[in-house]
Image (tube, rainbow, N blue to C red):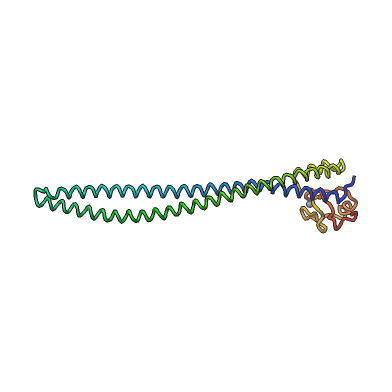
Amino acid sequence: MSVSAAALRELHRILRQLSDLRSRLERGPRQVRLGEDNVKRLEAIVAEAKDTVQKAKMSADDKELQLRERENRIADVKTKLNSCSSNREYQAFVEQIAADEQANSVLSDEILEMFEKISELQEVVTSSQGDLEKGKTELGAIRGRVDDERASLEGDVARLSNELQEAEAQLPGDLKLDYQRIVKARGEDGLAPLDGECCGGCYTKITMQTFDELRLSKPVFCKSCGCLLYLPEDRDVTA
Ligand SMILES: [Zn+2]
């Protein structure tokens, strides 16, 4: 039973490329998910900013209502000033008006401050909405790119899978089962080139006898890690 180093090199090349293509295929959906998570995060920021504005507006409305109620009360008390039955009552009304006017003056300042605050909060909403739009645009671009890549990667996977089938069909029957077992268990790492005097998979030194077997194109599995060994092109005496 013999198998050429060239055939094993070709097999390993195809296995490695397939594994690379498959990991690139898996990366696409991961990138889309990251983009989607980002959009969700930005949506939550926008919602929270809007909520903050809403609460500030309600609070400002409350204060304005309070202000108007007090203004009405002041106007009401002023009409009573002329019909006071005693000086004492008159004095009490005047003091009440002064107190209410003072309270309203403080409240007006507070309302003005709140309006300023609301306009700042509005700007936060606007800028977070801008970030969200940007995030959505990026997500669209990622989806488009991943879709394009997927089509091309799937084409490559199909082509290489055919090449793999053809290359595997060339393996001698006795070797096929052992090859399938190791590749099923370890994928592309089931094969390794000789690296110096070592197995390229586990870097254990091989014996002289193993090396001779490799040169004679006999199938050799590393005694240490079990992978199928082959000679690299620059050391392939049969090439
Ligand atoms: Zn090894």
Q: Position of residue 202 (x, y in %)?
A: 76, 53
Assign the C terminus to one quadrant of the image.
bottom right
Please give the name of the residue rendered at 36% of the width and 54% of the height, measured from the top-left corner: 115
Depth order, front residue of 31/116: 116
Drawn side of residue 94 relative to residue 180, left or right: left
Examine the rendering and report whether any part of residue 189 can be seen. no
Q: Quadrant of residue 157?
A: top right
Residue 19 appears at what percent x and percent y?
Answer: 73, 48
Tell me the residue at 87%/54% (across/down).
211
Q: Residue at x 51, y 52 (%)?
A: 130
**As drawn, is 121 to the left or to the right of 43?**
left
Task: Give residue 225's position: percent from left, percent from top.
Answer: 77, 50
Q: Position of residue 32 (x, y in %)?
A: 61, 47
For residue 190, side relative to residue 135 (left or right):
right
One can see residue 36 in this view: yes
Residue furthest to the left: 86
What is the tally of numbered marks visible in this picture? 0
- The answer to whether residue 205 is above or below residue 37 is below
Tell me what residue is drawn at x 52 percent, y 52 percent.
131
Check the picture and name the quadrant holding the N terminus: top right
Depth check, front residue: 98 or 34: 98
